[in-house]
Image: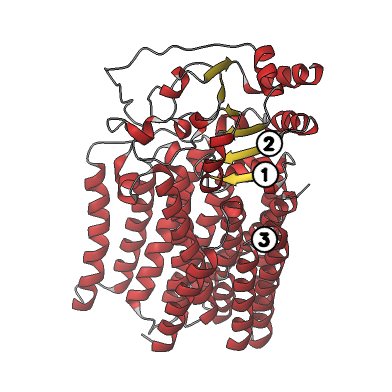
C-alpha cells in the first residue's frame, strides 16, 4: 500500500519540479494529478471498503463542485478561489481527525487535537479571507477593542485544555469540542483585522496551514502520503509567505498583529510637488521616439480589465521595432504571481514578464517607463526617506528611466496612504484618466503616428 | 510517535523547500493552486475514515471526502486552465 503512496508522492515532487519553467509547468501539473489518481485508486482497491456507494457519492459531489469552480472562476478572482480551497483542505483534515477520534478508542488524543486545531483554524480563517476578497465583508481591517486579548485568550485556552488532558479532570469529548470551538474563533479572530493590501500574505499563510493540517492528520492515521504531500504544501506556503512579507518589507508578526492601513498616516511636512499633466497625444509622441519601454502594471489595471488594451499598445510599439518589457512587483496583485496570470490571460508572452530583480537593472537604459495603476511600489521614497512608512520596501526603480509616464485616475494615495514623490520628479509626466480609456486613446494615437 | 513517520516528515520538508524555491515568481499563482490540489491528499484519509464505519465517523468522513475532492479536482483543473495561458510568442 505504502508503495503506491510513494509513487504518488514522487509524482507530486516531479510535478512541482516542472513548475520551475512555464514550458514544462503544464505537464508537471498533469503528472501531479496522475499521482493523486494513483493514490485514490490504490486506496480504493487495496482496502476492503464496505460502503463504496458513500465514497462514490462523495467523489461525485466533490468533483462536480470542484470542476464548476475551476471552470467558472475569473482570473481576477483567483485569490478568493485559492482562499476557499485552502479552507476546504483544512476542513477536510480536521474532519478526518474528528472521524478518527469518534471511531477509534485508542487514537493519540494530542495529535487529534492538533489536527483539529490547525484544520479548523484554516477553515474559518480562509472563509473570512474569502469573504473579504469577494466583498461580502469589508476589505478594511476590522478591529475591535481587546482583539489581541481575545486571540491570546483563545490560543491560551487551547494550550491549557491540551495540558490538563493528562490530568483527567475533563473527559476527552468535552476537551475535543472546546478545542474545536476555540480554533474556529481563533481562525476568524486572526484574519478579520487584516486589510486588503495584506491579503497576499494571509492567503500564502493559510496555504501553509492547510498543508500542515494534512501533515498532522498524516501522523494521526500513520499515512506517509499525507505527511509528504502536506509537508510539500506547507513548505510552499511558508516560502511564498516569506516572499510576500519581503515584498512589503513587513515582518509576519507585523502583518498579523499590525492592522496597517487602518489609519491614514498623514505626513505634515508634505512638500509641494510640481505635477506635469500631459495629454495622450503628447504621451504617444514620447513613446514613439523611445526605443526601450518598460510597462509597470498595478492592480488597478487589472480591475479595469485594461491589461488587454495595454498588451495591444505593447504589440503596436513592438511592431514599430521597439523593445517592450513588463516589470512585475511581487505584491502587484492580490496573491503571489497574480499579475503574471492576469497578463498571461491577455496573451502577453511569458518571457516578457520580468520580476523585480530581473527588471531593476533594465531601467538604467530605459527610455520610457509606463506606470499603469501602480503607486506605492514605484515610490522612490522607499529607497531614501527614512520617515516614510514604506521605507525599505523593495520598489521598481522606474525613476531611473529617461521618462516616466504615469497613468492615474486622480492624485489619490495608494494603500500606504502617502503621496508619491515620483509624481513631482523632473522626468515624470502624468496622464490622468481611466486606464482603459487612456490606453485606447493612446493606441489610436500611436497607430496614427 | 513513530520515528519512521518523523523521518519522512523531515526529509519531505527539505525536498519541498528545495523544489519550491526554484519556482519563478511568474508561476507563483499556479504553484499555489497546484499545491492546494496536492493538499487535497486528505481525500485518502477521508476514504479510510468512511471505511472504518460507525455512523458519526462515517458521516464526518463523507464530509471530509467532499471537501477534499473539491480541492483536488478544482485545484488541478484551475491550475491547468492558468498554465494553458502561459505562452511564448
Q: Nearer the viewer, mark 3 or mark 1?
A: 1
Residues marked 2 and 1 touching at CB (< 8 Å): yes
Eyeballing the image, is B81 above or below A192? Answer: below
Crowding near the residue tagged with mark 2, few <14, some 14–19, many ≥20 C-alpha atoms within 10 Å: many
User: A5 or A296, which is in the foreground?
Assistant: A296
Check chain identity for marks 3 and 1: say if they share one: no
Residues marked 3 and 2 touching at CB (< 8 Å): no
User: A365 or A438, which is in the foreground?
Assistant: A365
Numbered circle sitting on residue A324 = 2
Q: Chain of mark 2?
A: A
Estimate the spatial distance between the alpha carbons at disc 3 and disc 2, rounded to whole Å.
33 Å
Estimate the spatial distance between the alpha carbons at disc 2 and disc 1, rounded to whole Å.
8 Å
Numbered circle sitting on residue B76 = 3
Numbered circle sitting on residue A352 = 1
Could you say where residue A208 lies in the image, as x and y percent from the top left? 46, 60
Estimate the spatial distance between the alpha carbons at disc 3 and disc 1, rounded to whole Å.
26 Å
Amino acid at each position: 500500500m505504502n508503495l503506491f503512496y510513494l509513487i504518488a508522492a514522487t509524482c507530486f515532487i516531479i510535478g512541482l519540479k516542472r513548475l520551475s519553467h512555464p514550458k514544462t509547468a503544464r505537464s508537471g501539473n498533469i503528472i501531479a494529478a496522475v499521482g493523486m489518481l494513483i493514490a485514490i485508486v490504490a486506496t480504493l482497491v487495496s482496502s476492503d471498503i464496505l460502503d463504496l456507494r458513500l465514497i462514490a457519492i462523495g467523489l461525485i459531489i466533490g468533483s462536480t463542485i470542484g470542476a464548476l469552480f475551476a471552470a467558472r472562476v475569473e482570473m481576477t478572482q483567483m485569490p478568493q478561489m485559492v482562499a476557499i480551497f485552502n479552507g476546504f483542505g483544512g476542513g477536510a483534515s480536521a474532519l478526518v481527525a474528528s472521524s478518527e477520534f469518534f471511531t477509534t478508542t485508542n487514537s493519540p488524543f494530542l495529535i487529534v487535537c492538533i489536527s483539529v486545531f490547525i484544520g479548523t483554524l484554516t477553515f474559518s480563517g480562509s472563509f473570512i479571507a474569502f469573504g473579504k476578497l469577494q466583498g461580502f465583508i469589508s476589505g478594511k481591517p476590522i478591529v475591535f477593542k481587546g482583539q489581541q486579548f481575545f486571540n491570546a485568550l483563545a490560543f491560551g485556552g487551547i494550550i491549557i485544555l491540551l495540558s490538563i488532558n493528562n490530568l483527567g479532570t475533563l473527559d476527552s469529548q468535552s476537551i475535543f469540542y472546546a478545542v474545536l470551538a476555540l480554533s474556529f474563533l481563533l481562525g476568524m479572530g486572526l484574519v478579520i483585522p487584516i486589510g486588503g493590501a495584506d491579503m497576499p500574505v494571509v492567503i500564502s499563510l493559510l496555504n501553509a496551514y492547510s498543508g500542515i493540517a494534512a501533515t498532522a492528520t498524516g501522523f494521526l492515521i500513520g499515512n506517509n502520503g499525507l505527511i509528504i504531500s502536506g509537508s510539500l504544501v506547507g513548505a510552499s506556503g511558508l516560502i511564498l509567505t516569506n516572499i510576500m512579507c519581503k515584498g512589503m518589507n513587513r515582518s509576519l508578526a507585523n502583518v498579523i498583529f499590525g492592522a496597517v492601513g487602518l489609519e491614514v498616516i498623514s505626513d505634515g511636512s508634505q512638500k509641494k510637488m510640481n505635477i506635469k499633466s500631459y495629454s495622450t497625444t503628447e504621451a504617444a509622441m514620447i513613446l514613439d521616439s523611445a526605443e526601450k519601454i518598460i510597462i509597470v502594471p498595478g492592480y488597478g489595471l487589472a480591475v479595469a480589465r485594461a491589461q488587454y488594451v495595454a498588451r495591444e499598445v505593447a504589440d503596436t510599439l513592438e511592431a514599430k521595432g521597439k523593445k517592450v518589457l513588463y516589470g512585475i512587483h511581487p505584491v502587484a496583485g492580490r496573491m503571489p504571481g497574480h499579475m503574471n496570470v492576469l497578463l498571461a490571460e491577455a496573451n502577453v508572452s511569458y518571457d516578457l514578464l520580468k520580476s523585480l530583480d530581473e527588471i531593476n537593472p533594465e531601467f538604467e537604459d530605459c527610455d520610457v517607463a509606463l506606470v499603469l495603476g501602480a503607486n506605492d511600489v514605484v515610490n522612490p521614497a522607499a529607497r531614501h526617506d527614512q520617515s516614510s512608512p514604506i521605507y525599505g520596501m523593495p520598489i521598481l526603480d522606474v525613476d531611473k528611466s529617461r521618462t516616466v509616464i504615469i497613468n492615474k485616475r486622480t492624485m489619490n494615495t495608494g494603500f500606504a496612504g502617502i503621496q508619491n514623490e515620483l509624481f513631482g520628479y523632473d522626468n515624470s509626466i502624468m496622464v490622468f484618466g481611466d486606464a482603459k480609456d487612456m490606453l485606447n486613446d493612446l493606441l489610436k494615437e500611436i497607430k496614427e503616428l | 510517535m513513530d520515528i519512521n513517520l518523523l523521518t519522512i516528515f523531515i526529509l519531505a520538508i527539505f525536498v519541498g523547500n528545495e523544489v519550491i524555491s526554484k519556482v519563478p515568481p511568474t508561476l507563483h499563482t499556479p504553484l499555489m493552486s497546484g499545491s492546494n490540489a496536492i493538499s487535497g491528499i486528505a481525500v485518502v484519509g477521508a476514504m479510510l475514515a468512511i471505511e472504518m464505519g460507525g455512523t458519526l465517523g462515517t458521516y464526518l468522513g463523507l464530509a471530509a471526502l467532499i471537501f477534499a475532492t473539491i480541492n483536488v479536482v478544482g485545484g488541478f483543473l484551475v491550475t491547468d486552465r492558468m498554465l494553458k495561458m502561459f505562452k511564448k510568442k
